[in-house]
């Protein structure tokens, strides 16, 4: 087991904010059910709560309790994930409003990056995922860029590589099939 990831997962469980590699950029993550942790993450990014955040999980099974999905939608997600595809899905009442922002849907993904999935597994729950940057600035693509831009505000930075050629995840509304970000 990766001790580095285990430390990051423990920090998430304790209410901290960590940075970790995803398919295309470094992400910031925390416990989505810990309001203080989410507010800290939003403050670090200078991002309003109204915009909402992405929730990632190790599997659809880990995300499903927080979503309203029918069998067809579940089957569709099972076929597509893991992948750098984020879906907007109706959120269940179990998901805090500070994760959804002013939306009835939540953005969810099972990432195609093993470290991001393992982090969710070790944390024992889905985690927040948003690009590691101050809103409006370029997202960090390695741990050094994270440290330079946000370092002293974070509780931990996971070492790992992002795919340099990859672009941010595609965002699709699951219900309508509309592509919001190619």
Image (cartoon, rainbow, N blue to C red):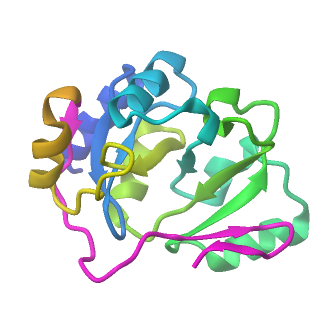
Q: How many marks?
A: 0
* Residue, far bottom: 165
- In this picture, residue 60 sits left or right of residue 58: right
Q: Nearer the viewer, residue 115 or 50?
A: 50
Q: Nearer the viewer, residue 107 or 10?
A: 107
149 relative to 40, above or below: below
Q: Position of residue 172 (x, y in %)?
A: 69, 70
Q: Position of residue 56 (x, y in %)?
A: 53, 52
Q: Position of residue 23 (x, y in %)?
A: 36, 69
* Residue, far front: 136
Residue 149 position by quadrant = top left
- Residue 3 appears in the figure: no
The question of residue 76 being in magenta is answered with: no
| SS majority, magenta | loop
- In this picture, residue 106 sits left or right of residue 35: right
At 28% from the left and 44% from the top, the residue drawn is 19
Residue 21 position by quadrant = bottom left
Q: Position of residue 132 (x, y in %)?
A: 31, 48
159 relative to 34, above or below: below
- The residue segment tinted magenta is 154-182
Residue 147 position by quadrant = top left
**Image quarter (top left, top right, bottom left or bottom right) of the C terminus:** bottom right
The question of residue 172 being in magenta is answered with: yes
* Residue, far top: 36
At 53% from the left and 39% from the top, the residue drawn is 125
At 25% from the left and 45% from the top, the residue drawn is 5
- Residue 139 appears in the figure: yes
At 38% from the left and 45% from the top, the residue drawn is 135
């Amino acid at each position: 087991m990766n001790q580095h990831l285990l430390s990051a997962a423990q920090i998430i469980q304790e209410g901290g904010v960590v940075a970790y590699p995803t398919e295309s950029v470094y992400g910031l993550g925390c416990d989505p059910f810990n309001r203080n942790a989410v507010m800290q993450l939003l403050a670090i990014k200078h991002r309003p709560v109204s915009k909402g955040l992405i929730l990632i999980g190790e599997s659809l099974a880990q995300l499903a309790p927080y979503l309203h999905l029918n069998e067809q939608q579940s089957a569709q997600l099972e076929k597509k994930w893991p992948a750098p595809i984020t879906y907007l899905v109706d959120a269940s009442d179990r998901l805090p409003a500070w994760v959804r922002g002013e939306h009835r849907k939540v953005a969810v993904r099972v990432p195609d990056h093993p470290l991001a999935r393992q982090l969710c597994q070790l944390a024992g729950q889905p985690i927040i995922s948003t690009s590691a940057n101050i809103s409006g600035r370029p997202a960090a693509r390695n741990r050094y860029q994270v440290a330079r831009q946000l370092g002293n505000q974070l509780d931990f930075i996971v070492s790992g590589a992002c795919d340099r050629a990859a672009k941010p995840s595609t965002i699709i509304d699951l219900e309508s099939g509309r592509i919001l970000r190619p």
